[in-house]
Amino acid sequence: MNNKALLVGINNYPSEGNDLRGCVNDVLDMAQFIGVKNSKYDITNIKTVLDHRATKKGILDALQWLINGASSGDQLLFHYSGHGAQIPSQGPLHEKDGLDEIICPYDFNQDPQTAIRDKEFAKIFATIPQDVHFVWISDSCHSADLSRKPDPITHPTLVTRFRRFKSADTANPNIHPITSMGAAVSPLRGALLSGCASHQLSADAFINNRFNGAFTHYLIKNLSMYGQDVSMQEIVKYVNIDLMDNGYEQNPQSEGLLATQKFFQ
């Protein structure tokens, strides 16, 4: 069995005013959780791509590393913490809402060609064999303001937002981030765990005297407690309770055929 994990986190975006604080810690914590505390992944098979290394090319190259050589029974994990957004749809397969979901690499500069679209992910993930246990964790927003929300409790004045796209009004609070991104996962019998619903923002939070994505923090907490016993759908429900109890206005989502299975094989 050849388990591999790709963990991407971007705190320091080059565009002024768009920096985040908890994404790199998300990656470090996830690496510690899967590689040390649970030993499900050999350290040599955990690749971290941080900040300036997480360009569009850097992420796409790392995704090829992740899926190359995957075979039946392997586990693959892709974790992304950073900015996300919606942009006008392109190509012959238009979304019904006219928008594509994207993640924003380090070198994203408002040009749609510098983003990574849901359709690009779908093309890459379509090459993963069906019997591979593939999980994608996205602790990011998929809304027009391209941000992870600052902590509403301890940092109400922290501003971490990108500008909206000038080519079209991409503000649509009714778009569910899983609907499009999930299309890249569901046919592959994978699972997508997302930090919030479409009309919400994922918190860049200050917890236990350090910054983290609130979703990633409580996801790791609940996986540590229950991950060997219950499905990813149930884990997300527990995370949702923790987020609500601690004042975060975000509801994590699960999608894909593997969501009814456990996080670890």
Image (cartoon, grey):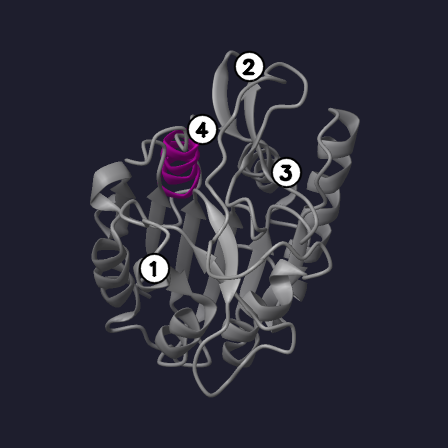
Residue at 72%, 45% in the rendered image: 251
Q: Magenta residues? A: 22-36
Residue at which label 1 appears: 3
At x 41%, y 69%, the residue is 121
- Is residue 78 highlighted in magenta? no
Earlier along the polypeptide chain: callout 2 or callout 3?
A: 2
Q: How far across and how far down the image is residue 27, in percent?
A: 38, 38
Residue 264 as seen in the image, left or right of residue 34: right
Q: Is residue 1 left or right of residue 245?
A: left
Q: Which residue is mark 2?
A: 208
Q: Nearer the viewer, residue 201 or 241?
A: 201
Q: Which mark is residue 22?
A: 4
Q: Residue 27 colored magenta?
A: yes
Q: Is residue 49 above or below residue 111?
A: above
Taking depth in this image into account, of 111 and 190 the one nearest to the observer is: 111
Q: Report the amino acid beneath label 4.
A: Gly
User: Is most of the magenta stretch helix, strand or loop?
Assistant: helix
> In the rendered structure, are the residues bearing label 1 and label 3 in contact, judged by CB atoms less than 8 Å apart?
no
> For the residues carrying marks 2 and 1, which lies nearer the camera in this image?
2
Q: Amino acid at mark 2?
A: Asn
Q: CA distance from mark 4 to mark 2?
A: 12 Å
